[in-house]
Amino acid sequence: QQPVQSPQAVILREGEDAVINCSSSKALYSVHWYRQKHGEAPVFLMILLKGGEQKGHDKISASFNEKKQQSSLYLTASQLSYSGTYFCGTGHQGGSEKLVFGKGTKLTVNP
Amino acid sequence: DSGVTQTPKHLITATGQRVTLRCSPRSGDLSVYWYQQSLDQGLQFLIQYYNGEERAKGNILERFSAQQFPDLHSELNLSSLELGDSALYFCASSVAAGLGSPLHFGNGTRLTVT
């Protein structure tokens, strides 16, 4: 039931783009995205609910493909501050209300 | 600052002991979640409470228990501690019980079992 994130790690130069994927084996109801910097608590980025909607947050946006049971996080023109580990958390309709997180994608942005 | 308060920040104890971790949610939030994060591991869901009632349970060991009190603060009790229980324990709160509300994480309690 744990979502699968890919890639596990990615290294970028400032200004480059990245995509992080999150896939589930079960039908999705909601997908949460969080960023955790080393030694800190995870910080909320965005939530997507089923319906294939796309959300944006400055240069970070995400899509939710209900049919494919996956979500993607898009980081555009990356900044040094984007470095951290990104987690997706998934919730499933008809099941319990637990939010299960993937193992994370470590993003490093270099100057 | 997320508004979620966790105490203590650090805890060092011996195997076989029992500890209590405390969490105060953000003002107005009724839901509390507990997660365990070990080295190189993701966030493992333990348990969720909403307005004092248990709403969802994850891979929480029988040695672990939790509760949410009428003032909405929550405690996670870990007993018969083992070396493998060493981890960072996060509490998060949200305004509602469902999965449509963001989680706000506290800074965690780092537990070291020696």
Image (spheres, coloured by chain):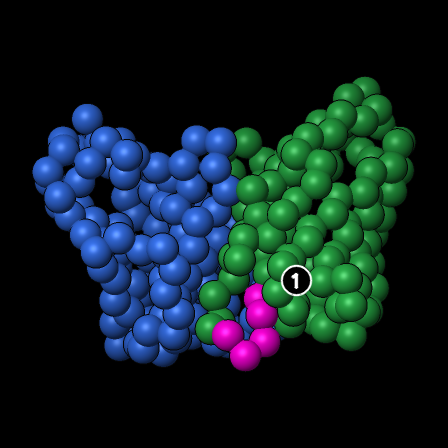
Chain colours: A green, B blue
Q: Could you say where residue A18 lies in the image, as x and y percent from the top left?
A: 82, 38
What residue lies at 39% left-to-right and 60% top-to-bottom? B58
In this view of the protein, which residue sits in the foreground, B50 or A105? A105
Please determine whether, in this image, residue B10 is positioned above or below residue B4.
Answer: above
Magenta stretch, main secondary structure, is loop
- Callout 1: 10 Å neighbours few (<14), some, many (20+)? many
What residue lies at 59% left-to-right and 36% top-to-bottom? A37
Q: Could you say where residue B50 lies in the image, as x and y percent from the top left?
A: 39, 75
Q: Chain of mark 1?
A: A
Please determine whether, in this image, residue A16 is positioned above or below residue B1.
Answer: above
Please determine whether, in this image, residue B85 is positioned above or below residue B77.
Answer: above
**Residue ranking furthest to the top:** A111
**Residue ranking furthest to the left:** B16
Q: Three-letter amino acid code at disc 1?
A: Val
Can residue B5 be spotted in the picture?
A: no
Residue bounds of the magenta highlight? A91-95
Report which quarter residue A16 is drawn in: top right
Can residue A23 be spotted in the picture?
A: yes
Report which quarter residue A15 is drawn in: top right
- In terms of secondary structure, where does tag 1 sit? strand
Q: Could you say where residue A109 lies in the image, as x and y percent from the top left?
A: 76, 27
**Residue ranking furthest to the front:** A25
Q: Is residue A93 magenta?
A: yes
Taking the image as shown, residue B94 lies to the left or right of residue A80, namely left
What residue lies at 35% left-to-right and 50% top-to-bottom? B6
What residue lies at 41% left-to-right and 36% top-to-bottom? B38
Residue located beneath label 1 in the image: A31
Assign the C terminus of chain B to one quadrant of the image.
top left
Q: Could you say where residue A12 lies in the image, as x and y percent from the top left?
A: 80, 27
Q: Is residue B96 magenta?
A: no
Taking the image as shown, residue A59 lies to the left or right of residue A37, namely right
